[in-house]
Amino acid sequence: MAYSSSTMGHRFPDREVSDRRAVGLALGRDVLIVACAISAGIHGALVPEHLGEGAGAGAGFLVSALLLIALGVALTRTAGRRVALASAIVLGSLIVAYGFAVTTGVPLLHPDVEPVNGLALFTKAIEVVGLAAALVLLERSGQNPHLSLNERTTR
């Protein structure tokens, strides 16, 4: 069993577990923030190109970028299970939408099949990492309902 050291030679195993859980939550939150930021930047940069293809595609990229920005900001402020869940839903939806875009097209938004390219694959890889971080945050925060996703390791 792992123990944490404290004053006067006493050991408190529960505090070490709590500290590790808090560090894991903080790291997961930070990974999720970075994933949202990178994906938002790429989607935002591609808005003009996709507006040229059609209003639906451009609007889809703009809305995606704005949602990702909002989630990133929310995660830096008062992140909780709802924000982690919303992040998982948005990132998962973007991954699924891309799957449709390169196989069948996305009705109304991007009906033509899009060719696979390196930037898109990079973006999806980042989103998969973000989705994994969001799912880990949801699972870990569910283990201890009193542990906030924003809890810092310093007390």
Image (cartoon, grey):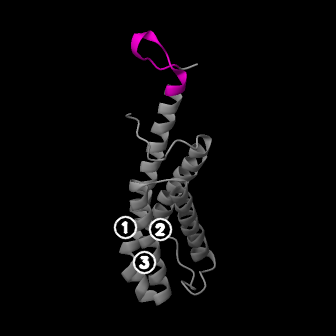
* Cα–Cα gap, marks 3 and 1: 10 Å
- Labels 3 and 1: the sequence-earlier one: 1
- Residue 59: within the magenta? no
For residue 84, above or below residue 113: above
Identity of the amino acid at label 1?
Gly
Q: Nearer the viewer, residue 74 or 29?
A: 74
Identity of the residue drawn at 49% across and 83% down: 57
Q: Which mark is residue 41?
A: 1
- In this view, the residue farthest toward the right is 104
The residue carrying pointer 3 sits among few (fewer than 14), some (14 to 19) or many (20 or more) residues within 10 Å by Cα, namely many
Q: Position of residue 85 (x, y in %)?
A: 56, 58
Q: Secondary structure at mark 3?
A: helix
Q: Position of residue 103 (x, y in %)?
A: 62, 75
The residue that mark 3 highlights is 62
Q: Nearer the viewer, mark 1 or mark 2?
A: 1
Identity of the residue drawn at 45% across and 63% down: 71
Image quadrant in which you'd find residue 52 = bottom left
Instruction: Specify whether residue 54 is in view.
Output: no
Q: Which mark is residue 51?
A: none
- Labels 1 and 2: the sequence-earlier one: 1
Q: Nearer the viewer, residue 11 or 110?
A: 11
- Residue 10: within the magenta? yes
* Cα–Cα gap, marks 1 and 2: 13 Å
Q: Position of residue 110 (x, y in %)?
A: 54, 83
For residue 74, above or below residue 107: above
The residue that mark 2 highlights is 120
CB-based contact (under 8 Å), mark 2 and mark 3: no
Residue interval drawn in magenta: 3-15
